[in-house]
Image: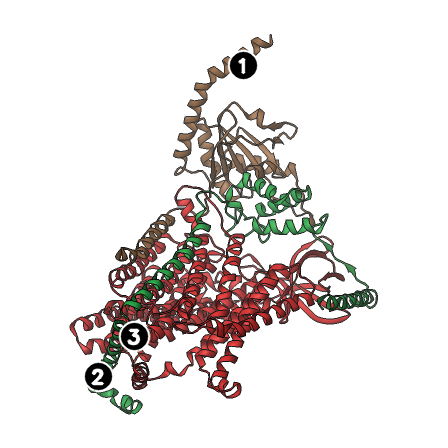
Amino acid sequence: MRKFLFFIPFVLFIALAAFLFSGLFSDPRQHGSALVSKTLPAFELPDLMAPTTLYNAEKLKGKVYLLNVWGLWCPTCNAELGFLTELRKQGIDIVGLYYVQPQDSAFGESFDLTKLQQDVVKKLQEQGDPYRLNILDEKRSLIFDLGVTGAPETFLIDAKGQIRAHHVGDINPQNWPALGAQYQALLEEAAEHKPTAEAATTAGAAYAN
Amino acid sequence: MMPEIGQLSLIFAFALSVLLALVPVYGSYSGNVRALLLAKPLAIGQFLFSAIAMACLMYAFYHSDFTVINVASNSSSMLPWYFQLTASFGSHEGSMLLWVTILTFWTALVAVFSKSLPLLMQGRILAVLGFICVGFIAFSLFMSNPFERSLPFFPVEGRDLNPLLQDFGMIVHPPLLYVGYVGFAVSFAFAIAALWGGKFDSTWARWARPWTLAAWLFLTLGIMLGSWWAYNELGWGGWWFWDPVENASFMPWLVGTALLHSLAVTEKRGTFKSWTVLLAIAAFSLSLMGAFLVRSGVLVSVHSFASDPSRGLYLLAFLLLVVGGSLFLYALRMNAVRSQARYQLFSREVLLWGNNVFLLTATLVVFLGTLYPLFHKELGLGSISIGEPFFNQLFYYLVIPFSLLLGLGPWVRWKQQQLPPLLKPLTLVALLALTIAIGYLAATQSLAANLALLGCLLGAWVGMSAIGEVYQRAQQLGGFSSGISRLQASHWGMTFAHIGFAVLVIGVAMTKTLSVEKDVRMKIGDTVELNGYHFTLTDVYALNGPNYGGQAAELEVYSEGEKVTHLHAEKRFYPLQKTVMTEAAVHARLSRDLYVALGEELSGPSWAMRVYVKPFVRWIWLGGVLMAFGALLALLDKRYRSSTVKVREKTAEIAGVEHA
Amino acid sequence: MLTKFQSKLQKLQWLKTLLLSLVLLTPFTTSAAEELMQFKDAQQQALYRELTAELRCPKCQNQNIADSNAVVAVDMREKTYQLVQQGQNKEQVIDFMKQRYGDFVHYQPPVQWSTIWLWLAPLLLVAGLFFVMLQKQRKAQSDAGEQGAGKIMAADQELEQQLQALINQAMLNQTNQTSQTNQTKHQSAREPD
């Protein structure tokens, strides 16, 4: 018994070393997301290119898609555009959420939508356009509700409007397979559920009639 | 040319360290006296070559030799010369070489000053230190070479030193901290040598004590300077942030403090033996773990060096070898050792054990607070953060019993203490402490600040008891005036260190509860009032430094119609590093600091300003300095300077006394 | 006595305000600076300070949102300010942030089964170490009672061993002197044996 007691420090240290070892191979900057498995928060935001068109969570429902937070000011986002465009060609549905950085009004900076639209069009012509549509979040309200800490960040959203994955950092050929597999699985899930969902709506319609 | 000389010296130092780790081991097993005697010149040689390497690196920095990658990425030709010199340990590579230099310096010191030790013991201690040197010199040489060149293509201008490090505090803070950190390697080596030999008598503790004291002294000063530097440089008036890197230096300090007290018990009473050895191993292990945490990128911190997983892996392997190995040896050897404990429940032994319990619990709190988020995440339980609210909460609870014990400790005798003789003086002390604490707070009319009261009370209790105890001891030594001169230096050391702790506690409690701050927008000519001080902004103008630009603000401070001081705050912009730095304006007095930080320019033109009045914040660092001064006094005690003969005489004398 | 003292101080306080107002009126005509953030009362201001000090900037290395100028920290400060002005209490604001950024965002970990060790482990350590002490002390007491004489013998033996060690080392030093001829002078000068 007494002999055993003297081994306690050694055993504790070995356990600590195991944690430190596994800590070496995980990124301390990745700290999960509180949004996964919640529904997309409510919002009402304009289209970047046609500000009179308004989107909300309800309108985007019914399809599996990636919600990609990006901005022209962010170099990693620009680097990511090429690969995302390739994904679009493969049939992946990507919705852009444009991140506007705060303007310093003290120094006469103000938000200029026309200029931004021109810059975005130019950029997307150069690098490729992965987006089905782009939502403009000038006040970063949806961005805040999504717990976004910077750009780029990407959310995988299922047909019911539920967030299924939250990816921080760029999407590249190395990390896409995992996310892609999840995307495919959701597509299949949606395909399974669709007939029943349609049946439900027709039933509802029948009742209404 | 110079970097190559440095490189070569480091290689020589490496070779010598390998010899130092091997030759005395051979000597100790074969009984070869010459092999044992070789340890000393090897240790000294190793230090000389490391020092040459460090000097060469400094030379390269001083002459802005941008062909050296380390210089190019951490210095610039516009940097003032003194910062060019200190930039040599501003990076991971450079600081590792500084670490190595200091480690070999301690080793050389041990070699020179251990004449009174048995030769076998000397050899073993130096071999252990040599082994640690091998690990770190190899790390510096093979994994993070500070002399690496980028020839044939090299930049014409360097990327400049991180502006955070361009401060006087940074010139002295890292060397002092490292001297402390690495110094625990010596007590560690003593402990391992003792485990190796399997002999544990109180002499081991006597030899290890001054070295531990010296390391602790420097660690205390290093931490205090770091805190002072953060206060001045980070611009939000904080002096401790519970950042993983700070915690990494705080843990060895806590265990080192426990070790100092435990060593006293082992030396004086021959008990707590296995405990003391464990603490000696733990103090250095925590230093090593700190180095790992800072340099591996396992934790996110404001201060950590750029990380590289292969470096982390090397350090972890070394940690496993040194710490795992020594703990294993400890488990094998120590369970056979039993100390003869003969003491009552109310005795100094038990009170010092209490001191150790709380210091170790404090270490555990810091340890968990630093590493638990990692455990939690690696176990797949999600990310959590642990910061100031948690640490503050637990330290409030820890400091209360700790301070109460601390006030009592010095009065109580070894073996056994009767309560009645202590009642009268201690009641007096408690009453005095109450009067001082309540009196002060009544005078400042903030009785509501219960926490400040509690802190004041604890501080006053510890401080008064320390003073009272000296008075009583002096009386016992034949009257106050003559007795006081007969008190030993180590006794004075203890008293000063304890008063230092009291001062620190008062400083922390008062600053935490009574600080006030205001965030304001100021135009030139505006005045802001805070705690009776009127700060008027008189001017703001462009700055033009050697390697920075920015703005400076001038303020006049008035209190009750009289001018208190003139303050000068800066907001610097370093173009090479594209960093903005706040140079706060501080007007320091014992009772309070006035602190102004210049923020960004707003429309108007006006400026965002943060203004603080921080009562007693100086006491925090004053307390630290007093503790370090106490350690210095204790180090000067005569018994640590006695040579072999004197030690022998003294032991005989003690033996005689005990026999009679 | 205390009340008397306090009332005296209060009188002084009155004098102080008078002096202050005199100062403010006379020499320099300055305007008071306005606070960057306006609050309804001091409690809301204190709450805002507390919250910005305890909420962690999720993007930064290791900083609270009060000390960081990252965009997300600025947005979080702004949101905190709005929520505090709306009269939400500390818990509500922290919950609001946690829903978006997770437990990570608060510097105080939540109390749940996976984190309870943060408080339990220190408590157990204190209790455990004191228990060890009591056990040890009790055992030593009974040992001393049974074989007091034996104990003294053991102590004597230890002293004997120490003396022997010292003698050994002195002898080793002697051998040093003879083997290291170049050191002989130094050593004999320092140690008049």
Q: Position of residue B448 (x, y in %)?
A: 66, 58
Which quarter of the rendering shows the N terminus of chain B?
bottom left
Q: Where residue B545 sits: x, y (%)?
A: 60, 66
Instruction: Report the disc number at residue A201.
Output: 1
Hey, what amino acid is under mark 3? Ala
Q: What residue type is labelled 2?
A: Met
Q: Nearer the viewer, residue B544 or C16?
A: C16
Colour given to chain A in the rendered image:
brown
Q: In this view, does B183 lie above or below C177?
A: above
Kindly indicate whether the residues beneath marks 2 and 1 are on one polypeptide chain.
Answer: no
In the image, the chain rendered in red is B
Q: Are marks 2 and 3 on the same chain?
A: no
Q: What element carries label 1?
A: helix
Q: What element carries label 3?
A: helix
Mark yes or no: residue C183 visible. Answer: yes
The quadrant in which the C terminus of chain B is found is bottom left
Of all chains, the one bearing label 3 is B
Label pair 2/1, CB-CB below 8 angstroms: no
Q: Colour of chain C?
A: green
Q: Nearer the viewer, mark 2 or mark 1?
A: 2
Quickly name the residue at label 2.
C171
